[in-house]
Image: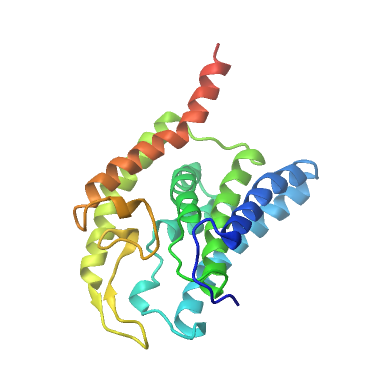
Amino acid sequence: MGTAPFVLFGTIHVFSLALIFAIVIGLPYMVNRSSDGNKDIVTKVIAFLLLAHAVASPYKDLFILENPYHWKEVLPFHMCDFSEIILAWFLLGGPKILFNLAYFWGIAGATMALLTPDVTVGGDLDYIFFFAGHGMIVIAVFYAILTLGNLPTLKDAHQVILITVFILLPIIYVINLILGDFEPYGIDPGGVTNYWYLMAKPDGDSLLNFFPDPPYHILPSLVITVCVFYLVYLPIGIKNKLNSR
């Protein structure tokens, strides 16, 4: 396992991004050229891998790492945790609202996480799980688009913004408050429960570095989130506009 400090857009980071991009393009290409039976199998395998990662990741954090996380840090409340679970549900036959949520959360959230990962060491077990989880979200979203033929509408974008900003965000904020601080554990110095990074900025370099200190970073974060959601819908809107002519 690697022990060198993580370097943003260093060799291992660029390699990880290139590998994910290759799978995003290559997997739908291969599956689209195969039978419907094979497509069903691949769809179920992707769903299983998403669920397997959702279960294995907190287990790794608590029981495998030499310096384990506190249990308050590994509950499945991060946006990307939600994305894994609802994507698996959708691929196994769930309603389209699950895809809509995963599309905006995945393209906006998981992609940003891959570009500016909250990791400190390049190539260790934490790094592998981080990129595997977020990478699978992006892969699954594009698989649902390019192979299964799903696309969100502008109405879907409005609905996802409503659910994310006005329903889930206040709930997650309250969960952070209820769980509160956690004591030092092993060499972990302790800290604050920080789902959705509402209570503190991530350790790694990210866009939040340019925002005010918590909790005042939440308002500009919301503005950026809404803008990014509309931005990731923009290619679909342009495509629909051109097709309607």
- Res 168 visible: no
Q: Which quarter of the figure has residue 78?
A: bottom left
Give the residue drawn at x 52%, y 58%. Answer: 134
Where 57 falls versus 188 (above or below)?
above
Give the residue drawn at x 26%, y 65%. Answer: 175
Q: Nearer the viewer, residue 22 or 29?
A: 22
In the displayed image of the protein, which residue is found farthest to the bottom?
186
Where 159 falls versus 240 (above or below)?
below
Where 83 falls versus 175 (above or below)?
above
Q: Nearer the viewer, residue 61 or 15?
A: 15
Q: Is residue 124 left or right of residue 225?
A: right
- Res 11 visible: yes
Q: Residue 119: horizontal and vertical position, in percent? A: 45, 66
Q: Residue 171: horizontal and vertical position, in percent? A: 26, 57
Give the residue drawn at x 55%, y 64%. Answer: 51
Q: Residue 121: horizontal and vertical position, in percent? A: 49, 71
Give the residue drawn at x 50%, y 58%. Answer: 84
In the displayed image of the protein, which residue is found farthest to the top?
245
